[in-house]
Amino acid sequence: MSLTDRSLALSDGSGGRNRQRSNFELYAWLFMRISGIVLVFLVLGHLFIMNILDGGVQRINFAFVAGRWASPFWQVWDLAMLWLAMLHGTNGLRTIINDYAERDQTRFWLKALLYVSSAFIILLGTLVIFTFDPTIG
Amino acid sequence: MATAPVGTLYRGGEGMWSWVAQRITGIAVFFFLYVHVVDTALVRVSPEAYDLIIATYKTPIVNLLEVGLVGAVLYHALNGLRVIAIDFWARGPRYQRQMLWTILGVWVVVMLPGTYYMMRHTIDALFGATP
Ligand code: HEM
Ligand code: HEM
């Protein structure tokens, strides 16, 4: 959608429905690209560490996570990855719902479901990072 | 919102299929992420609960699914960079096809050894080399 999205945003980003949305769509379009570039490092780095580096997935357990989250570096890494990937993915799905759901009612409810579940996941993931307790259990 | 992709870059041919694949991989990774945040949240329940769910990641079939997930993320990331280049680089649209073949080449070159290293334990376990 890249080229068409940009020309839509500059000429008629509201899709002809209301004028206020044109800026929002332009920022959303930009956000997809900026977050995408940052996510290349965060997510591909995460996948390399988790699946390839010494032993890959076979070495993951509670103690492994405790060791990583003892360091603020990996906490910040995971937090940034959580927020960026969730916002990027949620906005991507918003576009997809807009593309395929024809009825206004259907669109509304699908998007409501999307936003509520994404907010829940972002909140849950954030809470887990900030309240992690290595001595639990 | 447009209901169908318009413009020469997106109707038919590689341009359209690369976009379809971008969409499918994006959706798949997004839903994995929902599940993944929930399974990671088990560290707040107990070490045993977390280790139990992580044990499923180590089984042969899920291990294979992980290769699929990594392949999907890698394609989405590389093609995402290509889309960004098409949008912001003045010559991007002209080289979009070459860039597509380039990223597909990079994908294969990374996935070949990547699959081996990701599956090494499973291969050993199934075919009886040193575990
Ligand atoms: C099979 C592949 C994967 C494995 C084995 C894996 C493993 C892990 C592990 C062990 C953690 C715990 C925290 C840590 O040690 O840093 C974690 C957290 C996390 N992973 Fe993954 N990961 C995988 C794929 C992904 C992908 C594809 C994404 C992004 C799209 C992702 C995003 C995250 C996020 C956001 C967190 C933080 C969760 C939270 O805030 O509670 N992971 N992952
Ligand atoms: C790894 C780095 C990533 C890059 C470089 C990237 C790049 C992009 C770009 C440029 C777009 C917009 C495509 C367009 O406007 O035509 C996009 C769309 C999308 N991305 Fe990503 N992305 C990345 C990671 C992710 C992750 C981790 C997820 C899931 C949580 C995700 C889910 C999506 C979805 C659902 C779309 C919408 C697809 C569509 O509208 O057809 N992406 N991505």
Image (spheres, coloured by chain):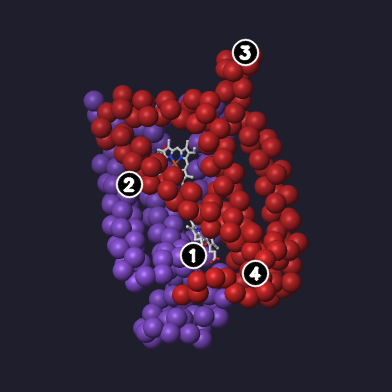
Q: Nearer the viewer, mark 1 or mark 4?
A: 4
Q: Residue at x 39, y 33 (%)?
A: A65
Identify the disc placed on residue B11.
Answer: 4
SS at circle 4:
loop
Q: Mark 1 and 4 residues: CB-CB less than 8 Å, in contact?
A: no
> Which amino acid type corresponds to the residue marked 1 in the rendered image?
Met
Name of the residue lying farthest toward the front = A103
Same subunit under labels 2 and 3? no
> Gap in Å between the C-alphas at discs 2 and 4?
39 Å
Q: Is mark 2 within 8 Å of ligand 1?
A: yes
| Structural distance between the alpha carbons of marks 1 and 3 | 46 Å
What is the letter of the purple chain? A
Q: Amino acid at mark 2?
A: Gly
Of callouts 1 and 2, which one flags the residue occurring earlier in the amino acid sequence? 1
Element class at badge 3: loop
In the figure, residue A24 lies in which quadrant?
bottom left
Q: Which chain is red?
A: B
Say if mark 3 contacts mark 4, CB within 8 Å: no
Instruction: Identify residue type, mark 3.
Output: Gly
The picture places residue B115, in percent across and down from the top left corner, at 63, 34
Q: Is the same chain shared between marks 2 and 4?
A: no
- In which quadrant of the rendered view does residue A102 lie? bottom left
Query: Which residue is identified by label 3?
Result: B128
Q: Is residue B74 left or right of residue A101?
A: right
Name the residue beneath numbered marker 2.
A125
Q: Chain of mark 4?
A: B
